[in-house]
Image (cartoon, helix red, strand yellow):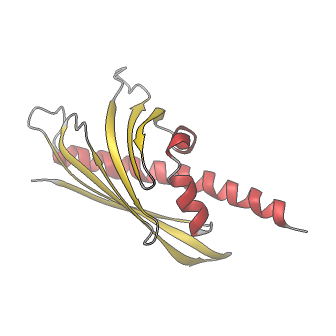
């Protein structure tokens, strides 16, 4: 058995702004509510190796891992996977972005697809982790949406005559 989740959200902002903000790893602590720190270990034009550290959980446990993220700006897709897998045998995440109509014009559909499998020694199984990710991903996506839409409104206010 393995775990699989799919979550998406419409962001009322231009695709280029959504792409730029959600791929600016150095500022993920401002975009996500769960990350205490981001350390970029290595980067090239479209590839990042980085360490994420979360805030302590309810039991005081701090989780940290290294991931690799490869951007495809032409197709507005991102492929990511954990290099330090921790409790996962593997964890792969695909991000995609597409323009969609919104009430105010054109927005962006941001989608996350996560495929993973927990190690037999992990404190949780695939079913539990699937539920956890399906609970947490919409929370993080909403936080991102709110911050990107705020940035879009601020940019729009600056360009109005």
Relative horizontal placement of residue 150, taking residue 29 as reference (left or right): right
Q: Residue furthest right?
A: 161
Q: Position of residue 111 (x, y in %)?
A: 41, 64
In the picture shown, does residue 133 fall above or below 14? above
For this rendering, which residue is in front, 123 or 25?
25
Q: Residue furthest top?
A: 60
Say which residue appears at 51% left-offset and 53% top-offset: 22
Say which residue appears at 25% left-offset and 41% top-offset: 83
On-image quarter of the C terminus = bottom right
Relative horizontal placement of residue 94, taking residue 31 as reference (left or right): left
Q: Position of residue 30 (x, y in %)?
A: 58, 40
In the picture shown, does residue 80 fall above or below 87? below
Answer with the quarter of the image where residue 106 lies.
bottom right
Q: Position of residue 86 (x, y in %)?
A: 22, 34
Say which residue appears at 38% left-offset and 35% top-offset: 51
Q: Position of residue 85 (x, y in %)?
A: 22, 38
In the picture shown, does residue 94 fall above or below 135? below
Say which residue appears at 37% left-offset and 20% top-offset: 60
Figure disc tally: 0
For this rendering, which residue is in front, 17 or 58?
17
Q: Residue furthest front?
A: 44
């Amino acid at each position: 058995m393995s775990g699989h989740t799919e979550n998406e959200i419409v962001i009322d902002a231009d695709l280029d702004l959504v792409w730029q903000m959600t791929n600016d790893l150095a500022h993920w602590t401002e975009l996500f509510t769960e990350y205490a720190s981001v350390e970029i270990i290595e980067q090239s034009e479209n590839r990042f190796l980085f360490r994420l550290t979360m805030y302590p959980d309810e039991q005081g446990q701090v989780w940290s891992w290294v991931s690799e993220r490869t951007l495809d700006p032409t197709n507005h897709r991102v492929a990511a996977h954990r290099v330090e897998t921790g409790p996962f045998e593997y964890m792969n995440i695909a991000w995609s972005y597409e323009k969609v109509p919104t009430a105010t014009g054109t927005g962006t559909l941001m989608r996350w697809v996560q495929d993973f499998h927990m190690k037999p020694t992990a404190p949780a199984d695939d079913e539990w982790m699937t539920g956890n990710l399906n609970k947490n991903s919409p929370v993080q996506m909403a936080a991102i949406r709110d911050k990107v839409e705020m940035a879009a409104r601020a940019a729009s206010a600056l360009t109005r005559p």
